[in-house]
Image (cartoon, rainbow, N blue to C red):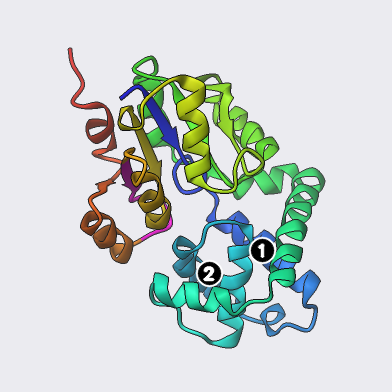
Amino acid sequence: MKLLVLDFDGVLSDSGHEAFVVARRTYLALRPDSSLREGDEAALHAAFLEIMPLGNRAEDFCVALAAIEAGVALPDQAAYDAFYREQDRAWLRAFHARFYRERDAFARSDPAGWLAMLRPYPQFLATLRRRAGACPYAIATAKDRRSVRVLLREYGVADLFREDLVLDKEAGVTKVAHHEHLARHCGVAYPEMTFVDDKVNHLDAVAALGVRCALSAWGYNGPREHQLAREHGHRVCSLDDVEAQLFGAPTG
């Protein structure tokens, strides 16, 4: 392995609660009469997290909330994709743009409250710190660069990631585009790269390039995604075995 590429949300950052809060605020700002305004927050949050692994970008949060409001079950990727195609594209674009404005407003008006919703996965960060120097680390995320950098500093690991190896939503729409850029930029072949994400659909797309892929089982997924990842030939890593699976057994 000559380059380890990491998704951010669900791999480095436990951001599910923050994503739900910002997504709900965005949804209600655009649809003020929505029934989700009065819904039980804990139940809505749980339903939201169940759907999260099936999406890709900020507009997918809108799709998840729309399905919850409509009472539409999305048990698998095919059902999700079909429901996504039914959504108005202008509405999805409006949600996507408004989501990042809402997140930025939240982070600036209540930085302590925002950070409290975005805790790291300390065991994985400790693994990265322990294995620093084995190969460069990169980030490929749909999150905005400013938030990523703020959180890396907050987590105490900003020094592990070179500035030019942090790719956000502006650097590419897809994880495939991120990996194509990184391969060119770093001069590494796809089989020399390893990608860790918490979403099987991202792994499937990147694996087609020849990249070794692994699912972070500590992210926003469950048995459904774990089985699917194994069926598709991806590694499934827990916090207890991720070091050995990515780097091999420690020596010395």
Vertical relation: 48 (above or below) 250: below
Q: List x then y, in percent, for residue 64.
A: 56, 72
Marker disc for residue 215 = none
* Quarter of the rendering containing residue 67: bottom right
> 87 or 134, which is in the foreground?
87
> 55 or 105, which is in the foreground?
55
Q: For the residue marked with disc 2, what is the amino acid?
A: Phe
The residue shown at (73%, 71%) is: 91
Q: Which residues are magenta?
A: 213-221
- The C terminus appears in which quarter of the rendering? top left
Q: Which residue is mark 1?
A: 23
Badges 2 and 1: C-beta atoms under 8 Å apart? yes
Q: Is residue 183 left or right of residue 169?
A: left
Vertical relation: 177 (above or below) 50: above
Vertical relation: 192 (above or below) 227: above
Q: Secondary structure at mark 1?
A: helix
Asked if the magenta segment contains residue 123, the reply would be no
**Residue 48 in sight here:** yes
**Residue 13 in sight here:** no
Mark 2 is surrounded, within 10 Å at the Cα level, by few (under 14), some (14 to 19) or many (20 or more) other residues, namely: many
Q: Is residue 38 left or right of residue 187?
A: right
Cα gap from disc 2 to disc 1, whole angstroms: 10 Å
Marker disc for residue 48 = 2
Q: Is residue 104 left or right of residue 198?
A: right
Q: For the residue marked with disc 1, what is the amino acid?
A: Ala
* Quarter of the rendering containing residue 162: top right
